[in-house]
Image (cartoon, rainbow, N blue to C red):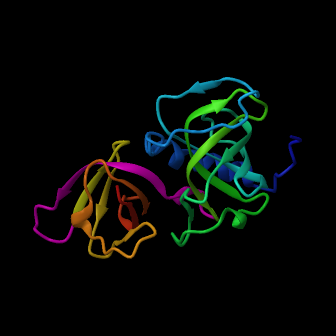
Amino acid sequence: MKKKSLYIAGICAALSVGALGCASSAKAGDEETKPVVEDTEAAEETTAAETICVYGPVSEVTSDSVTIDNQSGISSAGEMVITFSPETPIFDAETGNPVDMTEAETGTVVYAYIGEAMTMSEPPITNGQLFFVHVTDVSAVPVYTEIESVKKSAENDDTVYVKAEDGVTYTISAETHILPYLTRNIVTADDLEAGKKCAIWADAEGKVSRLVLFQQ
């Protein structure tokens, strides 16, 4: 696959800022989803201990994969093919709405949480577990993580503190929009439990504006 030139003025500098947000959630993800690589003749698989977050500008989108120039400094650098299925969560990073991967235009940045295996082919191929597209502010990219613990405020108000798997603590308040993923079920802070996966939109202080909860 021939690598396309994607760079526009300033994109490399912006992506370097985004490395901080991506690295903070490197331990998050659904470890039960096992990557399936159909091109078994390309090479053998290598495994990683955990789900990781990679990102970079898009060079190609197909019906079941997206090719990015991985600039996260994590995993394989450069061109990477990340597969997905109709069930793979894909979010608009700004609105939090589910979107189709076709909305990821060439040259725009995509953040991807990838699975445990990757081919040794060129470019390498791996399975995506969740994507954020339409990233315009790389300093405030949402995270995909697992809840480690939940603690209610001592003031007996509506505040709840959620500690994520990567050790970051987020503040859930009455203003936080807590939504289920692709269901009409009503979810509240009472549904936040250790072991559940979620996508979190938060500010620099950890105050959460939106949380999408994945039901198990």
Name the residue at 37% across, 59% down. Answer: 205
Q: Residue 215, relative to residue 195: is it above or below?
A: below
Residue at image location 67% in from the left, 62% down from the top: 101
* Picture coordinates of residue 185, whole percent (x, y): 34, 74
Residue 119: where, in percent of width, then height? Answer: 68, 30
Quadrant for the C terminus in the image: bottom left
Q: Residue at x 63, y 36 (%)?
A: 73
Residue sitting at x 72%, y 51%:
66
Q: How many marks?
A: 0
- In the figure, is residue 75 to the left or right of 48? right
Left or right, 76 with reference to 5 = left
14 sits left or right of 116 in the view: right
Is residue 195 inside the magenta stretch? no
Asked if residue 153 is among those painted magenta in the image, a careful observer would answer yes
Pick the quarter of the image with the N terminus: top right
Q: Position of residue 106 (x, y in %)?
A: 79, 59
Q: How far from the left and from the top, in percent, is residue 191? A: 25, 63
The foreground one among 22 and 65 is 65
Residue 100 lies in quadrant: bottom right
Part of the protein shown in magenta:
136-159
Q: Nearest the camera: 22 or 76?
A: 76
Q: Is residue 164 above or below residue 90?
A: above
